[in-house]
Image (tube, coloured by chain):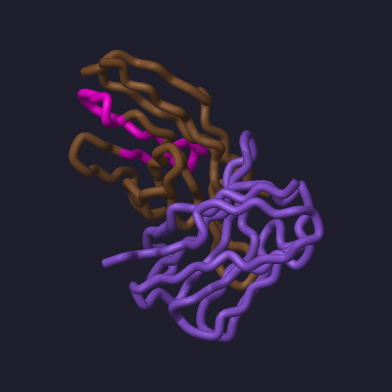
C-alpha cells in the first residue's frame, strides 16, 4: 500500500525566508502528484500538479519538484510571507478500484512570523 | 462560480441518529468524492462517483451510503451515527482524470 509521509509536521520561519517542504512516498508507480494548501476551517486548494512524466512545476513563488526514483517531492516557497501560513498537503494519484484515487500525506503546518 | 458547496457547515448528532451531508458542484464535473479528515490520519476516501448513476467504495466506506442521481449532487448519508464518525467531511470534484481536485469547505460533524 502506498505510504505518503510529510516531515516535519510543523514548521515556523521568519518572514522573507525561502523554505522547502518535503513529501516522501513508498511506491514510484504514480500518475501525478498534487500539492494543496489548507487554511484553518477551510477546504483544500490545489497549488500545483506534477504529472508523472514531469520533473517540476512552477507558479509564482512556488516550485514543486518530483523525483520518482527516490520517492520524493519538494515544495519550495520563495520569500515567504505571513499569508503563506497554512497547512500544506501532498497527494499522489494512484490506481485503486475502478478509478485512480488520491492518497494524502498528513501535512506540514507552516507558520510564517512577521 | 460557486465551485463545490457543502451543507451544513456544522452538525451535532446523537449516537444512532441518521443524517445526510449535502454536496453540490456547478462545474459539470463527472467525478465526485467524499473524504473524512481526522487528526494525524490525513484525508481518507469514503466513497466516490465517476458519473451519474455510478458509485464505488473508497478506503473507509462502512457506515456511509451515497447516491448520484444527477451530475451536480453527491449526498453522503450516515445511516446510524457513531462517535467514531466524528470528523470533518470534505466533498471534492474534478474534471478529467488527473486534473486538479476541487474541494468544498467541509462539514464538521460531532457525534455524542
Is residue A103 shown left or right of residue A61? right
Please give the range of residues in magenta. A64-84
* Whether residue A70 is visible: no
Which color was chain A given? brown
Q: Nearer the viewer, residue A96 or B95?
A: B95
Residue A77 part of the magenta segment = yes
Is residue B8 shown left or right of residue B38? left
* Whether residue B16 is visible: yes
Position above or below: A68 against B94: above
Q: Nearer the viewer, residue A12 or B12?
A: B12
Number of dots carrying numbers: 0
Residue A95 part of the magenta segment = no
Q: Return the x and y of residue A98 as percentages of the image width and height.
A: 61, 73
Q: Nearer the viewer, residue B16 or B99?
A: B16
**Quadrant assignment, res A60:** top left
User: Which residue lies at the image location 21% right of the left edge and 23% below the top edge?
Assistant: A79
Q: Return the x and y of residue A9 as percentages of the image width and height.
A: 52, 25
Q: Which chain is purple?
A: B
Position above or below: B96 against A66: below
Residue furthest to the left in view is A60
Is residue B14 shown left or right of residue A109? right
**Quadrant assignment, res B101:** bottom left
Q: Return the x and y of residue A55 as percentages of the image width and height.
A: 33, 44
Position above or below: B78 against A68: below
User: Which residue lies at the image location 41% right of the left edge and 41% below the top edge?
Assistant: A38
Q: Quadrant of the C terminus of chain A?
A: top left
Position above or below: B25 against A2: below
User: Which residue lies at the image location 40% right of the left edge and 64% below the top edge?
Assistant: B4
User: Which residue lies at the image location 43% right of the left edge and 57% below the top edge?
Assistant: B103
Q: Return the x and y of residue A6 as percentages of the image width and height.
A: 52, 32
Amino acid at each position: 500500500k502506498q505510504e505518503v509521509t510529510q516531515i516535519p509536521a510543523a514548521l515556523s520561519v521568519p518572514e522573507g525566508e525561502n523554505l522547502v517542504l518535503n513529501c516522501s512516498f513508498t511506491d514510484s508507480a504514480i500518475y501525478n502528484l498534487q500539492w494543496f494548501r489548507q487554511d484553518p476551517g477551510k477546504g483544500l486548494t490545489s497549488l500545483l500538479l506534477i504529472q508523472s512524466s514531469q520533473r517540476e512545476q512552477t507558479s509564482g513563488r512556488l516550485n514543486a519538484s518530483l523525483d520518482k526514483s527516490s520517492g520524493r517531492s519538494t515544495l519550495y516557497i520563495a520569500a515567504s510571507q505571513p499569508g503563506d501560513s497554512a497547512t500544506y498537503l501532498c497527494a499522489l494519484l494512484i490506481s485503486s478500484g475502478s478509478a485512480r484515487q488520491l492518497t494524502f500525506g498528513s501535512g506540514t503546518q507552516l507558520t510564517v512570523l512577521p | 462560480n460557486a465551485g463545490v458547496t457543502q451543507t451544513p457547515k456544522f452538525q451535532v448528532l446523537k449516537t444512532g441518529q441518521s443524517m445526510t451531508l449535502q454536496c453540490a458542484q456547478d462545474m459539470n464535473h463527472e467525478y465526485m468524492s467524499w473524504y473524512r479528515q481526522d487528526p494525524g490520519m490525513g484525508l481518507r476516501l469514503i466513497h466516490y462517483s465517476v458519473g451519474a448513476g455510478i458509485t464505488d467504495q473508497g478506503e473507509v466506506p462502512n457506515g456511509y451510503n451515497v447516491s448520484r442521481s444527477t451530475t451536480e449532487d453527491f449526498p453522503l448519508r450516515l445511516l446510524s451515527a457513531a462517535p467514531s464518525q466524528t470528523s470533518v467531511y470534505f466533498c471534492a470534484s474534478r474534471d478529467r482524470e488527473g486534473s486538479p481536485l476541487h474541494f468544498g469547505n467541509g462539514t464538521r460533524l460531532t457525534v455524542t
